[in-house]
Amino acid sequence: MDDADVHPLISAYMERREDLLRYFRVRLRSDEAAEDLVQDIYLKIVDRRAETIDNPAAYLYRLGTNLMLDRIKARRRAQARDAQWHGANVSDAGGAEIADEAPADEAAAAKLQLAKTLEALKAMPPAAQEAFRLHKLEGLSHAETAAAMGVSRSSVEKYMMASLKLIVAKVGRWP
């Protein structure tokens, strides 16, 4: 392949590669980022059709600047997204950051225990199931559960005792 076969844009790139590196190294403050960017410039121009560009050097700098700005915008969007997630999912406790969600193994164990508990509930009489659901799962007090079910508070307490005994026997202690 002789010089006549080389696309003018590729030729301009090869002549100015070191200048492009210096130019973007200063703007990005990173040797690695500048290398990546200059490589991306090459990848953008290598497959271009042979079209006439009046000022190939200016084109290369403009292309590189546009790529750099796209990367900066993408990095800012990612940082904003990460900060938003961090704010919603992490708490600060005495200077230590703590994730608000349980570790995966604990979440899986809790899900398994809940499935076993719900299976045990199916073996209970309907009134005991309803009392357990209202009190433990919906958070109603014994008095509120009794009122919702139309039974005495003593009945709710008996249902709960029977339910908890059955669950502890089949699943283990309820947290």
Image (tube, helix red, strand yellow):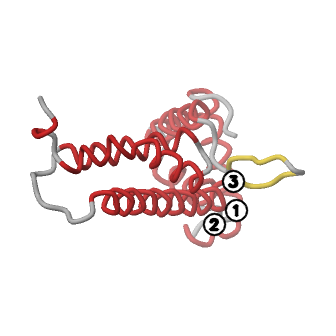
Quick check: marks 1 and 3 in contact, CB under 8 Å?
A: no
Q: Which residue is mark 3?
A: 90
Q: Between marks 3 and 2, how big is the CA–CA gap?
A: 39 Å
Return the x and y of residue 116 as percentages of the image width and height: 50, 33
Q: Amino acid at mark 1?
A: His
Is residue 102 or residue 81 the one in the foreground? 81
Which badge, 3 or 2, is on the more N-terminal residue? 3
Q: Residue most toward the front?
A: 3
Is residue 121 or residue 19 the one in the foreground? 19
Quick check: marks 1 and 2 in contact, CB under 8 Å?
A: yes
Determine crowd level at label 1: few under 14, some 14-19, many 20+ residues with C-alpha closer than 10 A: many
Mark 2: which secondary structure?
Answer: helix
Which residue is at a point 33% across and 56% down the rendered structure image?
60
Above or below, 32 against 76 in this view is above
For the C terminus, which image quadrant?
A: top right
Mark 3: which secondary structure?
Answer: strand
Q: Amino acid at mark 2?
A: Ala
Return the x and y of residue 38 as percentages of the image width and height: 40, 45
Q: How many marks?
A: 3
Q: Which residue is mark 1?
A: 142
Return the x and y of residue 46 as percentages of the image width and height: 21, 43
Q: Find residue 137 and report its image quarter.
A: bottom right
Mark 1: which secondary structure?
Answer: helix
